[in-house]
Every structure is written in C-alpha cells, then in structure tokens.
Amino acid sequence: MKAAQLAKYDENFKLDVNNIAIPEINSNEVLVRVKVAAVNPLEMLIGTGSVKLIQDYDMPLTMGNELTGIIEHVGKKVTNFKKGDAIYARLPQENIGAFAEYVAIDSAAIALLPKNLDFSTGAAAALTGLTAYQGLHEELNVKPGQTIFIPGGSGSFGQMAVPIAKDMGLKVIVSGNEAARNRTLSLGADQYLDFRTENYWEMLSDIDYVIDTLGPNEFEHELSIIKPGGRLLSLRTGPNKRFANDRGITGFKKGLFSLAGAKFDRKAKKANIEYHFIFVRSDGAQLAQITKIIEKNNIVPAIDSQSFSLDEINRALDLVNHGKTTGKVLIKF
C-alpha cells in the first residue's frame, strides 16, 4: 500500500510516498481502508520535532492524525464494530498513520461516522471535536451558566467548540473575522467580536474561562479578562508543570516542561488564574458523545475548496502551513 512517511525530524521536512506492507491487526484492533485523511497544524509540530518531548516517534513514520474510512477486518476481541462500518477517528498519538491506504486502529479510538456527515466532512470533525470536548470537560471542568471566551474561534476549532459549549449550558463569546460572524452565531454563539475593529480586552471582563487558539502573544490580554479563580486553556502556548503532572510525566521531561511553562505559570498565578495546556488524545467513547451533538445540531465542519491525492501530500502540508484555507484541508483516497 502507499503511505506518506517522515524520514527524520526537520524544520523543512518533506514526506516521501512509499510502498509498505498493509498492517496486521491484533485482537483489539480494526483494519480500516482510509477514505479521507485530514491535514492539521499538528502535522507541522510532529514533522519539525516540536512535540517530540510529548511524543517521540521511530522513523520512518507514517504521518496523519485524523481520518474517515471503512472497516475491512475486525480483531477477535472487537464486538462493537463490524466489517463495512463507516468510522471516523483521531488516531492514538503513539500510533498515528492516517496518510496511508490502510491503517490498523485500536477499536477504543474510533466511532461510527455521524449520519449527517460524509467521508470528507467527517474527516474534519474528530480532532477538533475531541479537543473541544476534553478541554471543556476535563481541563476547564465548566459548569452551566458560566461564560467562556474563544479568541480566534471562528475557524475549524470554533465550529466544534461553540455547539459543544452551548450543549453544556455555557454562555459563549467568540472573536474572529467578520466573514465568519453569521456562521458562528448560527452555531449558538451568544456574542461575536470582529478582531479587526474590536479589542476584546477592552470590551470583556469577569470571564470564567478562555480557550486560547492564538498562542503566547495573546497570553496577557487573555489573562486580563478572566475573573480571579478562572482558568485559561491554551491549544498553542505550550506545556507546563501541570501538563506534566496530569499525564504522569516525571524526571527530565517534567523539568523541561516546568521550565518551558514557568513564565506563563508565574503570570497566571499572579492573577489567581489556572493555566492549562492540552494535547488531545484519542477516545472513541467521547467521540460517540460528540457524534450525538453533531447530529443533534446538524454540525457540518467546513472543508477547504482544494483537496489533494496522497501523491500531493507535500502541497497539502504547504497550504496548511503557509496558505489561506477556508476549512480543513483533505487528502482523498
């Protein structure tokens, strides 16, 4: 089968499309024929080695974290899926490989494809959906009636986070570009700010929670609007000591995470705010709950007008890394 593989970490990495064996499955896995794989910024972090302290990989590495596909074979202990099922998944971080014609996946990482999504739109839902779900439930531990702000929430993450947050009873405020206003409000957002004309740090205060999608340059602005005792969750700023403790990371790696996140922890502590960082994991049971929210609210993630074949993988990566996209970039098989 064809697979797009990374030979080594490199700031300017390129993937090679190689012919490799179709993987064998163990008793808890399913063999999936990939229909569509999504290209995410996470690919850039993996390929450059930016997250190797969180997850280091053996080379060559078949890349790709998110997919839809059809089950071809099921392991002996798999009872909740069958051959022919259409599924979607964020692959386990220690065993990725969506940029391939076939992939072996632990059945605990997959869920049936939502009825209102096809293989293309479904491939854009799993990773952002799980990020939003785990962020809201586990990291922020939100309560109904509280307020959350998502700066830069007009993109693919916000499309999933807004309806999930509303389903949990939150008041949701989003900032983004004006073109996405109506779409974001239609998903349930209570307030929308145009980042070009409205500075959120001048307009908002006493916010319970912020989910940061923009990175460290916004850290102090985000802290300034959160009430004492609130929480800031970042998707981009970087891991810290809490991240290491929550994942049972010890020794040298814990020290590095503590050092890397120290200045952010100090600023957050001074404001009496908890700083959290998330690196989303696979979870089929959570994905099944997200499926219910997707179907209930008829959420259809945006996909970019351009799609690519596996042989065009490096063009797709370049678009995600440097271009302007209108939705999730896809590799179609």
Image (spheres, rainbow, N blue to C red):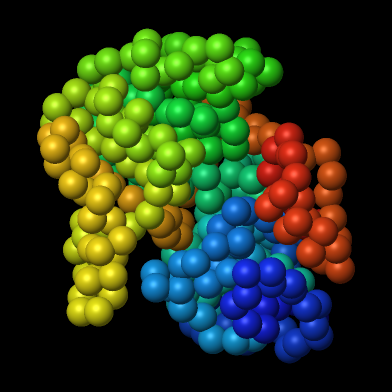
Give residue 215's quadrant in the image: top left
| Nearer-the-camera pick, 227 or 298 | 227
Location of the N terminus by quadrant is bottom right
From the top left corner, tell me how far across and down residue 219 is, in percent: 35, 37
Q: Is residue 283 left or right of residue 84?
A: left
Residue at 63%, 16% in the rendered image: 178
From the top left corner, tell me how far across and down residue 280 is, in percent: 42, 55
From the top left corner, tell me how far across and down residue 122 is, in percent: 65, 45
Q: Is residue 318 left or right of residue 152?
A: right
| Nearer-the-camera pick, 160 or 42 | 42
Residue 106 in view, yes or no:
no
Q: How many marks?
A: 0
Residue at 61%, 62% in the rendered image: 43
From the top left corner, tell me how far across and down residue 277 is, in percent: 33, 50
| Nearer-the-camera pick, 189 or 150 | 150
Give residue 164's quadrant in the image: top left
Location of the C terminus by quadrant is bottom right
Residue at 61%, 61% in the rendered image: 44
Residue 152 in view, yes or no:
yes
Q: Is residue 222 left or right of residue 309?
A: left
Question: In this rendering, is residue 147 above or below 88?
Answer: above
